[in-house]
Image (spheres, helix red, strand yellow):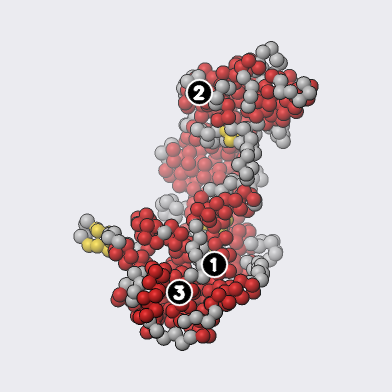
């Protein structure tokens, strides 16, 4: 961004966009880009003032408008995995604000004027006049689309009943809220919202009515109860809107009545939204044919209907009935599931593990077994997940629903952006990658090493007890229980091992924290009683202490195996009887048992020589 105020001169900076009828700023950017290249070519590659100006205008008009984000309304149109990106407002902070302001004052194009004035005001909030110019230019653009002199890309003949117009109005209203809600520009923007909402409702366009009615309620432009009543008028008219638009309109009407303190009407609209979703769920579940029916989609719609009835008085019986319908639908979900498999050749890994085990004493084998692998670095897991999302942006573009084997939706992952992930999307990707890691470790390393130990040694329970009595992870009163569980694990009785060891993790974590001087109880002031913190509470309230005692790598590994969703959620399934006969023999359970054994032996590594003398 090399352009300065001195570059402006008497150039006709709007020449490249002369004749454009687009109301979209990005179309201006596309016109300025080749103009800047052509200006440079005429000067035989030299960067001229004209070229600098056109390149800067291409950049500032090419930013992506995020109207719903008041404090950060513009972002890069393009962001690369290596950190490169297109322009953002911060690129114009140093030495360009005066130039942007001057250009905004001179610009004849309302689209260009709005973008230039908005960015200049965003970078320097003291220039309230520029904020007013931006609002006026945004409203002028919308009125021009209504008159037909400007058009949004891919728009029809609906004038300003376009999503682009909604975005421009939203941005104008955000500015108006900041510089003065009753100033002329803000009043014009508010009037435009009412006009477009009324026109959308009168024309029966459900989507447009939803856009502008929601905008009206978001900014409190009109009486919310009156807006809700007008939405009901749209819903009363016959139309072919799909269930998503219909239910959204009913929910928006309920919101309007809520803001207007008309609870009876609010609950009625909530019920209508729910019943629209129920009807669609039943239609999908029945299907015109068996091939067209979808239990998964129907159950998703039905669960949404049940949630919509939450808080509605006298809806308890209806919710119970719908939950029965939901269970019936979910029972057919497993029939729609497919198994996708990918084969890895792990013979080389298994061979290396077997060679590494070699012919050693039993104690050496046990320590070697506990060090087969290490817990991954949580920062590396996040970085890998974010890189995977950037490499495969479509994979997290939509929300994901995680079902259990009975078809119940047990977890929902929120969608990430295009090429970027929020916390939920990153956690989903971490769970997927970590599941693959545990699978490979359990099948190609842990199982191979376990079989090698049992093929070479007789492993008495007394030997394990003699070893574990020195571990600070094992409470003295549970040495026999741990020893019995690990013996079953080495013998291949994974069911016994998993069901014994999994509940013991929580107690051992408390035991270690107590040894470090930390309080692991809660005190009820009312009853004057104390309770031990559960494992979930330990991770919520004592996470720093756990990290200090075990390292972040290990605590994150414990969390990912035993607690987190999406993930195995092993502790919950074992504790509540939700596991099935195959669960203990799966890679997650095997890895979980090995991880507990590793936690028992890790503190003993510096004392192997002394232990070798004590244990034969």
Could you tell which of marks 1 and 2 lies nearer the N-terminus?
Answer: 2
Pointer 1 residue: 438
Q: CA distance from mark 1 to mark 2?
A: 52 Å
Q: Residues within 10 Å of mark 2 (few under 14, many from 20)?
A: some
Seen at 51% across and 70% down, the residue is 372
Seen at 37% across and 57% down, the residue is 548
- x, y (%) of residue 555? 43, 60
Q: Pointer 1 and pointer 2: residues touching (CB < 8 Å)?
A: no
Picture quarter with the N terminus: top right
Q: Nearer the viewer, residue 189 or 245?
A: 189
Pointer 3 residue: 367
Residue 310 vertical placement versus 68 (above, below): below
Q: CA distance from mark 1 to mark 3?
A: 20 Å
Q: Nearer the viewer, residue 107 or 48?
A: 48
- x, y (%) of residue 446? 53, 74
Asked if residue 106 shows in the view, the reply is yes
Pair 1/3: label in front:
3
Could you tell which of marks 2 and 3 lies nearer the N-terminus?
Answer: 2
Q: Which mark, by number, is residue 124?
A: 2
- x, y (%) of residue 512? 33, 65
Q: Pointer 2 and pointer 3: residues touching (CB < 8 Å)?
A: no
Q: In which quadrant of the rendered view does residue 56 lie?
A: top right
Q: Pointer 1 and pointer 3: residues touching (CB < 8 Å)?
A: no
């Amino acid at each position: 961004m090399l352009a300065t105020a001195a570059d402006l001169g008497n150039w006709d900076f709007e020449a490249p966009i002369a004749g454009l009828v687009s109301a979209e700023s990005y179309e201006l950017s596309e016109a300025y880009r080749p103009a800047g290249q052509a200006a440079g070519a005429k000067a035989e590659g030299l960067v001229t003032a004209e070229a600098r100006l056109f390149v800067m205008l291409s950049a500032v008009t090419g930013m992506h408008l995020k109207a719903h984000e008041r404090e950060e309304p513009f972002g890069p149109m393009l962001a690369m995995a290596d950190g490169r990106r297109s322009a953002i407002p911060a690129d114009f902070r140093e030495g360009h604000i005066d130039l942007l302001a001057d250009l905004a004052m001179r610009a004849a194009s309302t689209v260009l004027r709005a973008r230039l004035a908005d960015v200049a005001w965003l970078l320097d909030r003291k220039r309230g006049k520029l904020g007013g110019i931006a609002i006026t230019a945004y409203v002028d653009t919308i009125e021009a689309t209504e008159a037909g002199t400007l058009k949004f890309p891919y728009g029809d003949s609906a004038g300003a009943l376009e999503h682009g117009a909604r975005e421009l109005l939203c941005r104008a209203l955000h500015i108006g809220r900041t510089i003065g809600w009753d100033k002329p520009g803000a009043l014009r923007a508010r009037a435009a919202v009412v006009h477009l909402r009324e026109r959308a409702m009168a024309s029966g366009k459900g989507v447009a009515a939803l856009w502008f009615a929601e905008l009206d309620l978001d900014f409190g432009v009109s009486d919310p109860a009156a807006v809700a009543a007008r939405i009901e008028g749209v819903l009363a008219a016959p139309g072919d809107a799909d269930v998503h638009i219909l239910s959204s309109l009913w929910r928006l009407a309920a919101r309007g009545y809520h803001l207007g303190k008309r609870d009876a009407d609010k609950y009625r609209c909530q019920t209508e939204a729910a019943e629209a979703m129920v009807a669609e769920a039943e239609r999908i579940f029945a299907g015109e044919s068996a091939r067209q029916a979808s239990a998964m989609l129907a159950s998703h719609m039905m669960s949404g209907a049940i949630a919509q009835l939450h808080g509605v008085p006298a809806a308890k019986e209806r919710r119970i009935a719908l939950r029965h319908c939901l269970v019936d639908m979910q029972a057919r979900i497993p029939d729609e599931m497919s198994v996708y498999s990918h084969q890895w050749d792990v013979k080389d890994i298994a061979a290396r593990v077997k060679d590494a085990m070699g012919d050693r004493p039993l104690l050496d084998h046990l320590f070697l077994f506990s060090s087969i692998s290490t817990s991954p670095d949580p920062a590396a897991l996040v970085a890998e997940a974010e890189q995977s999302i950037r490499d495969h942006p479509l994979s997290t573009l939509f929300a994901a629903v995680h079902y259990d084997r009975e078809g119940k939706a047990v977890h929902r992952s929120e969608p990430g952006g295009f090429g970027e992930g929020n916390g939920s999307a990153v956690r989903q990707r971490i769970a997927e990658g970590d599941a693959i890691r545990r699978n490979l470790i359990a099948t190609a390393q842990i199982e191979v090493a376990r079989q090698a130990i049992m093929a070479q040694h007789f492993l008495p329970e007394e030997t394990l007890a003699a070893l574990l009595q020195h571990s600070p992870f094992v409470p003295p009163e549970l040495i026999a229980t741990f020893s019995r569980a690990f013996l079953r694990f080495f013998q291949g009785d994974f069911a016994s091992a998993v069901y014994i060891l999994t509940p013991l993790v929580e107690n051992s974590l408390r035991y270690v924290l107590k040894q470090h001087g930390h309080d692991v109880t809660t005190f009820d002031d009312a009853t004057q009683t104390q309770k031990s913190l559960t494992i979930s509470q330990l991770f919520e309230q004592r996470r720093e202490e756990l990290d200090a005692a075990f390292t972040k790598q290990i605590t994150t590994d414990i969390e990912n195996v035993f607690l987190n969703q999406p993930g195995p959620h092993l502790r919950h399934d074992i504790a509540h009887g939700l596991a099935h006969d195959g669960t203990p023999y799966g890679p997650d359970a095997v890895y979980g048992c090995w991880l507990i054994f590793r936690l028992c032996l890790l503190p003993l590594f510096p004392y192997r020589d002394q232990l070798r003398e004590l244990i034969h």
